[in-house]
Image (spheres, rainbow, N blue to C red):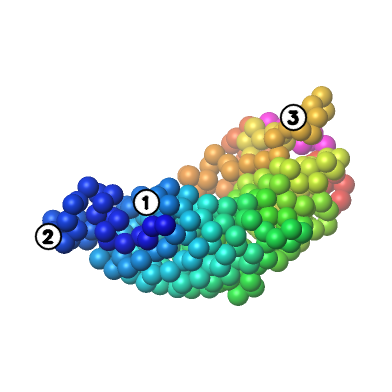
Amino acid sequence: MVQLTMDLIAKNAGHKNPSEEDFGQYVQRLTHLNLSDKNIDSIGELSFCKNLRVLYLYDNQINQIQHLDFASNITHLYLQNNRISTIENLSSLKKLEKLYLGGNYITVVEGLDKLGELRELHIESQHLPLGEKLLFDPVSLNSLAKSLSVLNISNNNIDELEELAVLENLSYLKAVDNRLQHMKDLKVVLKKWTKLRRLDLTGNPICQKPNYKDRIIIQSLTLADFVTPCFKVPLHPSRSVKEETDSLDLAHKQKGEGKPLPRISERGSQMKTRVCFSNNFLLVMLVIACLK
């Protein structure tokens, strides 16, 4: 097997003698390092790479996250498809923004309580013991409550989302191919995720429920408060559920301009944007009006 060391970096960079002065200057300037698919099984001493920002180590045989104390400037860490079973030794990565851990052997999402800048966590498709689901450590979740905006937990046997409600700034949740099946399990989180713009539940049992998308829209505070110009619910009576996309993309055109979207209650001259509704969406709004 192969250990990630300065010698390996030198070999990858084409340097025959890693002690040469030009190589020392090279590794100090290094900001991106791609050592994916190199059959690496462990991470060695890399203290000279102090300016490293992006580290690609996916598709290897790494079984432990270690020796990354030097990497205080890393913002992106790619560790997909290794043999990692525990999230650990990341407390020094104060600037880490994106962490990719999909396709490993992790059973508990933990060890993230020092990563106050983490915006994206991708932890899909873990190799879990038969019949078990991916678990979440409350301490780590609370630490990520204000920073995390993108979470990918697809294919992890997850049957409820209530514990994730603390992620108050979540804007995109990808939970494809899990075991979510009851609308009541989504009700709590949909009301608390006030910044949610995109939700992908493809392959969950709940997708087979009649009008499940309409019901999700009703429950979501994001959609109850705002109407997207020309927004159409991706649901057509002549198509089967499988033919429909199960991703609700709620991003709006005016976000980049910092302008709020028009409310349904605004009239005439206050409405600067023509709002186009599909028949299904009009039906949903009528239901909301009757509930008031």
Q: Which residues are magenta?
A: 276-283
Q: Which residue is mark 2?
A: 21
Say which quarter of the image contains residue 247.
Answer: top right
Residue 117 point in image, percent of width and height:
46, 65
Q: Nearer the viewer, residue 58 or 112?
A: 58
Give the residue type that dot 3 points to: Glu
> Which of label 3 and label 1 is nearer to you?
1
Give the residue type that dot 1 points to: Leu
Circle 1: element type: loop
Residue 225 point in image, percent of width and height:
68, 50
Q: Is residue 169 above or below residue 252?
A: below
Is there a contact, CB below 8 Å, between mark 2 and mark 3?
no
Residue 206 point in image, percent of width and height:
80, 47
* Left or right: 15, with 149 as reference point: left
* Left or right: 87, with 57 as reference point: right
Q: Which residue is mark 3?
A: 243
Give the residue type that dot 2 points to: Glu
Residue 292 point in image, percent of width and height:
84, 52
Give the spatial CA distance, label 2 vs label 3: 60 Å
Q: Is residue 63 visible?
A: yes
Q: Residue at x 77, y 59 (%)?
A: 131
Residue 35 is tagged as 1
Q: Nearer the viewer, residue 188 or 160?
A: 160
Asked if residue 164 lies in the magenta stretch, the reply is no
Residue located farthest toward the front when viewing the structure as drawn:
1
> Closer to the N terminus: mark 3 or mark 1?
1
Give the spatial CA distance, label 3 vs label 1: 39 Å
> Closer to the N terminus: mark 1 or mark 2?
2
Circle 3: element type: helix
Q: Main secondary structure of the magenta part?
A: helix
Q: Residue at x 28, y 49 (%)?
A: 12
